[in-house]
């Protein structure tokens, strides 16, 4: 089971940013969220791991079922949710004072893991999964800020994977990266969906077309069209989707 | 939070130019078809030679349209209807080019019959060709207006062309059976029927491209 979103609404104070969204996000697939700036796609993404509510004055109403369980249920701990549903941000944000190794291990240690051998194992696996291991295996103790932007972003993905999430949310993960690094992240996304459910916000239409299985087009806080990526990019049903993806509306 | 409508003027302009070029090409093909049939009817060698020579223009058009379409795909990353438009350009240009070749084939039959007398006055072949020419024209009009309904009429017209072809063949068989001296020319004329029939099929392809362009699905008009 993936993510089932029912009647989701979100506000920033009086601003109704997300309106009555119903969406089924399939497991082990990549779902892309596209739409012009301010359309609510990032807000929606942050609702998926209870990050929206940390903003002052922000509110959420509705239901998000992950494996059938409402993540907004009264007895659910938002911190646990954020482990299960990891997030990668637009700008790579490694912990600046930590080494490469410690960046990946941080979540594990916060979780109370003490077994050094086990930690080392998971760090290596995570870096491997993020496609970074070969580039950093000989300098794990070096500061993470010495890595290139693309490497930093993959480090952040490794850090997210280390705590063994089921779902990975990505908010424009390549918008600050050069084409080669972008390509590596896209390749990674393709590989990761075997084990994770991925939701990605992107402004790069070609990226959505390349990496995702499903695409949701957001406009003014609503989902205008949600379908397979193939359908959206070859023959969308709604004229507004067509106008947006062909670059005539933004 | 309302979005704004953007102008993709250079891209839209290039699409427009491409469409105009395709219609010019279509005009040449219609003319080639008409001229080839006239050349046959009147055994006009000069006209037949002209059809053969002018086919180079049609080929050049196809190449030009294809190159422009490839350029647009490479530089504009078209999707959805923009992409279908460009794919249709390439496909329709290909169909038109083939039609041009069939017109050349007909003109070459005229050449082969140089110095002969027609075994009978041609009636059905010109009518069949007229129907095929009308199909080409209908296909191009459907394309200009993105008129799906009009595109679907090509199915019936193609049936008419096929019926003509059958009738022509039967008639030619009869003539051949009665007088074996006519066999060589009768076979040539049967080829002409076959060429026209193929032109009709390519015209239905144009109709299919129009429907694909508008609706994103591909029907079979050649049933």
Image (tube, coloured by chain):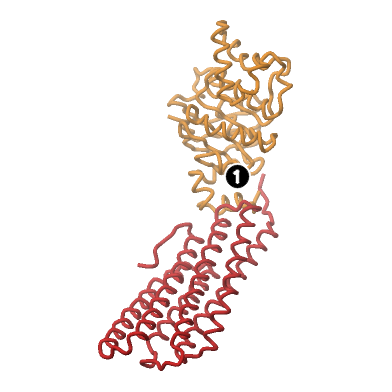
Chain colours: A orange, B red
Residue at the (65%, 13%) spot, across then down:
A102
Percent x, y for residue B133?
Answer: 47, 79
Decide which of A98, B6 is in the foreground and name it. A98
Q: Secondary structure at mark 1?
A: helix
Task: Locate the C terminus of chain B and report the quarter of the image it occupies.
Answer: bottom left
- The tally of labels here is 1
Q: Which residue is mark 1?
A: A206
Task: Locate the N terminus of chain B and report the quarter of the image it occupies.
Answer: top right
Task: Look at the picture and state if B197 lies above or below B183.
Answer: above
Residue at the (62%, 17%) spot, across then down:
A104
Horizontally, is A242 left or right of B205 in the view? right
Percent x, y for residue B7?
Answer: 69, 57
Q: Chain of mark 1?
A: A
Percent x, y for residue A247?
Answer: 64, 51
Residue at the (55%, 27%) spot, across then down:
A168
Task: Look at the picture and state if B222 lies above or below A90.
Answer: below
Can you tell which quarter of the image residue A61 is in?
top right
Decide which of A5, A198 is in the foreground and name it. A198
């Amino acid at each position: 089971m993936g993510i089932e979103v029912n009647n989701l609404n979100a506000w920033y104070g009086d601003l109704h940013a997300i309106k009555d969204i119903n969406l089924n996000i399939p497991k082990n697939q990549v779902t892309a969220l596209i739409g012009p700036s301010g359309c609510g796609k990032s807000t929606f993404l942050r609702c998926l791991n209870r990050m929206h509510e940390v903003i002052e004055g922000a509110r959420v109403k509705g239901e998000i079922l992950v494996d059938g369980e409402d993540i907004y249920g009264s007895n659910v701990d938002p911190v646990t949710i954020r482990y299960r549903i990891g997030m990668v941000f637009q700008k790579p944000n490694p912990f600046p004072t930590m080494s490469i190794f410690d960046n990946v291990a941080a979540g594990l240690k916060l979780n109370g893991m003490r077994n050094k051998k086990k930690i080392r194992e998971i760090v290596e696996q995570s870096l491997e999964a993020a496609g970074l291991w070969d580039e950093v295996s000989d300098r794990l103790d070096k500061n993470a800020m010495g890595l290139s932007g693309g490497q930093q972003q993959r480090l952040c993905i490794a850090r997210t994977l280390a705590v063994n999430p089921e779902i990975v949310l990505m908010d424009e993960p390549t918008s600050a990266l050069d084409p080669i690094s972008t390509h590596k992240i896209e390749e990674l996304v393709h590989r990761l969906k075997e084990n994770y459910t991925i939701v990605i916000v992107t402004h790069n239409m070609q990226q959505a077309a390349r990496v995702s299985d499903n695409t949701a087009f957001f406009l003014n806080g609503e989902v205008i069209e949600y379908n397979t990526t193939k359908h959206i990019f070859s023959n969308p049903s709604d004229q507004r989707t067509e106008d947006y993806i062909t670059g005539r509306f933004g | 939070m309302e979005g704004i409508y953007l102008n993709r003027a250079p891209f839209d302009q290039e699409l427009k130019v491409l469409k105009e070029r395709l219609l010019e090409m279509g005009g040449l093909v219609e003319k080639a078809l008409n001229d080839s049939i006239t050349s046959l009817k009147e055994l006009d060698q000069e006209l037949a030679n002209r059809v053969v020579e002018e086919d180079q223009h049609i080929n050049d058009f196809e190449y030009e349209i294809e190159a422009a379409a490839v350029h647009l795909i490479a530089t504009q990353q078209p999707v959805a209807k923009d992409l279908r438009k460009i794919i249709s350009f390439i496909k329709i240009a290909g169909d038109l080019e083939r039609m041009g070749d069939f017109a050349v084939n007909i003109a070459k039959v005229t050449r082969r019959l140089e110095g002969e007398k027609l075994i009978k006055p041609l009636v059905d072949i010109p009518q069949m060709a007229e129907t095929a020419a009308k199909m080409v024209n209908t296909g191009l009009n459907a394309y200009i207006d993105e008129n799906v309904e009009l595109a679907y009429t090509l199915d019936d017209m193609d049936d008419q062309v096929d019926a003509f072809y059958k009738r022509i063949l039967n008639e030619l068989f009869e003539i051949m059976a009665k007088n074996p001296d006519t066999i060589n020319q009768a076979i040539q004329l049967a080829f002409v029927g076959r060429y026209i029939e193929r032109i009709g099929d390519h015209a239905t392809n144009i109709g299919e491209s129009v429907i694909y362009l508008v609706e994103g699905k591909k029907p079979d008009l050649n049933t």
